[in-house]
Image: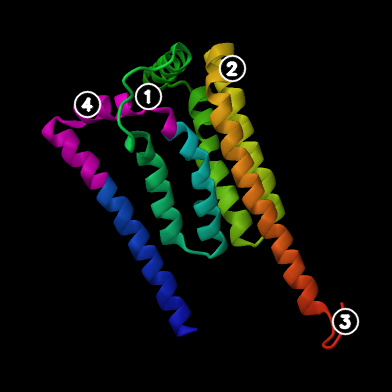
Amino acid sequence: MKRATTIRRTDVILSVGTLALVLLAVAAMAATGTLDEFGAWAWERHHNVLSWYIRPLFLLPFCYFAYRRSLFGMTLTLVALATSMFWFPAPEQSSSGALEFLAMEREYLTGEWTVAKILLALIVPLSFAVLALAFWKRSIVYGLVLINAMVLIKVVWSFYFGGGAGGLTLLPSAIVGLAVCDAVVLYLIRRRRRRSSESSRPAGHPG
Protein backbone atom coordinates (compact mmCIF):
# COMPACT_ATOMS: atom_id res chain seq x y z
CA MET A 1 0.00 0.00 0.00
CA LYS A 2 2.84 2.36 0.82
CA ARG A 3 4.44 1.75 -2.58
CA ALA A 4 1.15 2.50 -4.38
CA THR A 5 0.74 5.71 -2.39
CA THR A 6 4.28 6.79 -3.28
CA ILE A 7 3.69 6.17 -6.98
CA ARG A 8 0.51 8.24 -6.94
CA ARG A 9 2.28 11.07 -5.15
CA THR A 10 5.14 11.01 -7.65
CA ASP A 11 2.64 10.98 -10.50
CA VAL A 12 0.96 14.09 -9.14
CA ILE A 13 4.29 15.87 -8.56
CA LEU A 14 5.47 15.14 -12.10
CA SER A 15 2.16 16.30 -13.56
CA VAL A 16 2.12 19.54 -11.58
CA GLY A 17 5.78 20.12 -12.43
CA THR A 18 5.11 19.67 -16.15
CA LEU A 19 2.22 22.12 -16.10
CA ALA A 20 4.31 24.58 -14.09
CA LEU A 21 7.11 24.42 -16.69
CA VAL A 22 4.61 25.11 -19.48
CA LEU A 23 3.18 28.10 -17.61
CA LEU A 24 6.68 29.40 -16.85
CA ALA A 25 7.60 29.16 -20.53
CA VAL A 26 4.49 31.12 -21.52
CA ALA A 27 5.14 33.68 -18.79
CA ALA A 28 8.78 34.06 -19.90
CA MET A 29 7.72 34.71 -23.50
CA ALA A 30 5.13 37.22 -22.33
CA ALA A 31 7.71 39.00 -20.17
CA THR A 32 10.24 39.20 -23.00
CA GLY A 33 7.64 40.29 -25.53
CA THR A 34 8.12 37.26 -27.77
CA LEU A 35 4.73 35.66 -27.12
CA ASP A 36 3.03 37.31 -30.11
CA GLU A 37 5.96 36.45 -32.35
CA PHE A 38 5.84 32.83 -31.21
CA GLY A 39 2.07 32.74 -31.73
CA ALA A 40 2.44 33.98 -35.31
CA TRP A 41 5.17 31.40 -35.97
CA ALA A 42 3.05 28.59 -34.53
CA TRP A 43 -0.05 29.70 -36.44
CA GLU A 44 1.80 29.56 -39.76
CA ARG A 45 2.85 25.98 -39.03
CA HIS A 46 -0.71 25.18 -38.01
CA HIS A 47 -1.61 25.53 -41.70
CA ASN A 48 0.09 22.18 -42.30
CA VAL A 49 -2.79 19.69 -42.48
CA LEU A 50 -0.59 16.92 -41.05
CA SER A 51 -1.18 18.47 -37.64
CA TRP A 52 -4.92 18.22 -38.29
CA TYR A 53 -4.65 14.49 -39.02
CA ILE A 54 -2.58 13.57 -35.97
CA ARG A 55 -4.64 15.58 -33.49
CA PRO A 56 -7.50 13.05 -33.07
CA LEU A 57 -4.92 10.28 -32.61
CA PHE A 58 -3.83 11.81 -29.30
CA LEU A 59 -7.05 10.42 -27.87
CA LEU A 60 -5.46 6.97 -27.97
CA PRO A 61 -2.46 7.62 -25.67
CA PHE A 62 -4.68 9.78 -23.46
CA CYS A 63 -7.12 6.89 -23.03
CA TYR A 64 -4.27 4.42 -22.57
CA PHE A 65 -2.72 6.42 -19.74
CA ALA A 66 -6.14 6.93 -18.18
CA TYR A 67 -6.68 3.17 -18.32
CA ARG A 68 -3.27 2.69 -16.72
CA ARG A 69 -4.20 5.41 -14.21
CA SER A 70 -1.13 7.46 -15.03
CA LEU A 71 -1.85 11.12 -14.39
CA PHE A 72 1.60 12.08 -15.63
CA GLY A 73 1.08 10.23 -18.90
CA MET A 74 -2.24 11.97 -19.43
CA THR A 75 -0.62 15.35 -18.72
CA LEU A 76 2.19 14.72 -21.21
CA THR A 77 -0.37 13.70 -23.83
CA LEU A 78 -2.33 16.92 -23.34
CA VAL A 79 0.86 18.98 -23.63
CA ALA A 80 1.75 17.10 -26.82
CA LEU A 81 -1.75 17.70 -28.15
CA ALA A 82 -1.52 21.43 -27.45
CA THR A 83 1.90 21.76 -29.07
CA SER A 84 1.19 19.51 -32.07
CA MET A 85 -0.10 22.48 -34.06
CA PHE A 86 3.50 23.58 -34.70
CA TRP A 87 5.28 20.23 -35.03
CA PHE A 88 5.31 20.36 -38.82
CA PRO A 89 6.80 23.03 -41.10
CA ALA A 90 4.59 25.70 -42.58
CA PRO A 91 3.31 24.58 -46.00
CA GLU A 92 4.42 26.40 -49.11
CA GLN A 93 0.81 26.61 -50.23
CA SER A 94 -2.51 25.99 -48.51
CA SER A 95 -5.85 25.17 -50.07
CA SER A 96 -8.52 27.86 -50.18
CA GLY A 97 -10.69 25.74 -47.88
CA ALA A 98 -7.94 25.46 -45.29
CA LEU A 99 -7.25 29.19 -45.42
CA GLU A 100 -10.96 29.96 -45.03
CA PHE A 101 -11.35 27.59 -42.10
CA LEU A 102 -8.25 28.87 -40.30
CA ALA A 103 -9.33 32.47 -40.83
CA MET A 104 -12.66 31.63 -39.21
CA GLU A 105 -10.91 29.80 -36.37
CA ARG A 106 -8.58 32.73 -35.71
CA GLU A 107 -11.44 35.23 -35.75
CA TYR A 108 -13.38 33.00 -33.38
CA LEU A 109 -10.50 32.68 -30.91
CA THR A 110 -9.52 36.35 -30.96
CA GLY A 111 -13.07 37.70 -30.97
CA GLU A 112 -15.21 38.69 -28.01
CA TRP A 113 -15.68 35.93 -25.47
CA THR A 114 -19.32 35.95 -24.42
CA VAL A 115 -20.79 33.79 -21.67
CA ALA A 116 -22.21 31.40 -24.25
CA LYS A 117 -18.82 31.15 -25.94
CA ILE A 118 -17.08 30.43 -22.64
CA LEU A 119 -19.62 27.73 -21.77
CA LEU A 120 -19.12 26.18 -25.18
CA ALA A 121 -15.34 26.20 -24.69
CA LEU A 122 -15.72 24.45 -21.34
CA ILE A 123 -17.07 21.42 -23.20
CA VAL A 124 -13.50 20.60 -24.24
CA PRO A 125 -11.91 20.15 -20.78
CA LEU A 126 -15.12 18.61 -19.47
CA SER A 127 -15.10 16.06 -22.31
CA PHE A 128 -11.50 15.09 -21.59
CA ALA A 129 -12.27 14.79 -17.87
CA VAL A 130 -15.24 12.48 -18.51
CA LEU A 131 -13.23 10.48 -21.05
CA ALA A 132 -10.40 10.05 -18.55
CA LEU A 133 -12.89 8.94 -15.89
CA ALA A 134 -14.42 6.36 -18.22
CA PHE A 135 -11.08 4.70 -18.99
CA TRP A 136 -9.85 5.17 -15.43
CA LYS A 137 -12.87 3.11 -14.33
CA ARG A 138 -12.16 0.59 -17.13
CA SER A 139 -15.43 1.48 -18.90
CA ILE A 140 -14.01 1.06 -22.38
CA VAL A 141 -17.37 0.91 -24.17
CA TYR A 142 -18.50 4.19 -22.60
CA GLY A 143 -15.10 5.62 -23.48
CA LEU A 144 -15.59 4.64 -27.11
CA VAL A 145 -18.94 6.41 -27.17
CA LEU A 146 -17.33 9.52 -25.70
CA ILE A 147 -14.53 9.50 -28.29
CA ASN A 148 -17.09 9.47 -31.09
CA ALA A 149 -19.14 12.18 -29.40
CA MET A 150 -16.09 14.45 -28.97
CA VAL A 151 -15.10 14.17 -32.62
CA LEU A 152 -18.71 14.64 -33.73
CA ILE A 153 -19.02 17.82 -31.65
CA LYS A 154 -15.83 19.16 -33.26
CA VAL A 155 -17.21 18.45 -36.74
CA VAL A 156 -20.56 20.06 -35.94
CA TRP A 157 -18.73 23.10 -34.54
CA SER A 158 -16.66 23.42 -37.72
CA PHE A 159 -19.76 23.28 -39.94
CA TYR A 160 -21.73 25.68 -37.73
CA PHE A 161 -19.04 28.36 -37.43
CA GLY A 162 -17.01 27.64 -40.56
CA GLY A 163 -19.83 27.02 -42.99
CA GLY A 164 -19.90 24.22 -45.52
CA ALA A 165 -16.40 24.88 -46.86
CA GLY A 166 -14.87 25.03 -43.39
CA GLY A 167 -16.62 21.89 -42.23
CA LEU A 168 -15.68 19.93 -45.33
CA THR A 169 -12.05 21.00 -44.91
CA LEU A 170 -11.87 19.52 -41.42
CA LEU A 171 -14.03 16.48 -42.17
CA PRO A 172 -11.40 14.19 -43.80
CA SER A 173 -8.92 14.47 -40.91
CA ALA A 174 -11.74 13.96 -38.40
CA ILE A 175 -13.03 10.84 -40.18
CA VAL A 176 -9.57 9.29 -40.56
CA GLY A 177 -8.65 10.01 -36.95
CA LEU A 178 -11.95 8.68 -35.64
CA ALA A 179 -11.69 5.53 -37.78
CA VAL A 180 -8.24 4.76 -36.38
CA CYS A 181 -9.35 5.41 -32.78
CA ASP A 182 -12.48 3.28 -33.18
CA ALA A 183 -10.52 0.42 -34.77
CA VAL A 184 -7.93 0.36 -31.97
CA VAL A 185 -10.48 0.61 -29.13
CA LEU A 186 -12.77 -2.01 -30.70
CA TYR A 187 -9.80 -4.35 -31.07
CA LEU A 188 -8.94 -3.85 -27.39
CA ILE A 189 -12.55 -4.49 -26.36
CA ARG A 190 -12.61 -7.72 -28.36
CA ARG A 191 -9.24 -8.79 -26.97
CA ARG A 192 -10.34 -8.02 -23.42
CA ARG A 193 -13.56 -10.04 -23.79
CA ARG A 194 -11.64 -12.97 -25.29
CA ARG A 195 -9.22 -12.98 -22.36
CA SER A 196 -12.13 -12.78 -19.91
CA SER A 197 -13.83 -15.70 -21.63
CA GLU A 198 -10.65 -17.79 -21.58
CA SER A 199 -9.96 -17.06 -17.92
CA SER A 200 -13.49 -18.06 -16.92
CA ARG A 201 -13.31 -21.36 -18.84
CA PRO A 202 -12.70 -24.38 -16.55
CA ALA A 203 -9.22 -25.90 -16.69
CA GLY A 204 -8.97 -28.73 -19.17
CA HIS A 205 -12.09 -27.57 -21.04
CA PRO A 206 -11.65 -28.36 -24.76
CA GLY A 207 -13.09 -24.94 -25.73
Query: Distance between the Cα atoms at labels 3 and 1?
Result: 57 Å
Side of 84 where 60 appears, left or right: right
**In the image, which disc is placed on residue 9?**
none
Principal secondary structure, stretch drawn in magenta: helix
Q: Which dot, 3 or 1, sits closer to the camera? A: 3
| Amino acid tagged 2 | Tyr
**Magenta stretch in the rendered image:** 23-50
According to the picture, the residue beneath numbered tag 4 turns out to be 36
**In the image, which disc is placed on residue 160?**
2
* Residue 176 coordinates in the image, percent (x, y): 58, 35
| Figure label count | 4
Q: Quadrant of residue 178?
A: top right
| Amino acid tagged 3 | Pro
Question: Residue placed at 59% from the left, 49% from the top?
Answer: 131
Query: Distance between the Cα atoms at labels 2 and 4?
Result: 28 Å
Name the secondary structure under disc 2: helix
Q: Upstream in the sequence, badge 4 or badge 1?
A: 4
**In the image, which disc is placed on residue 206?**
3
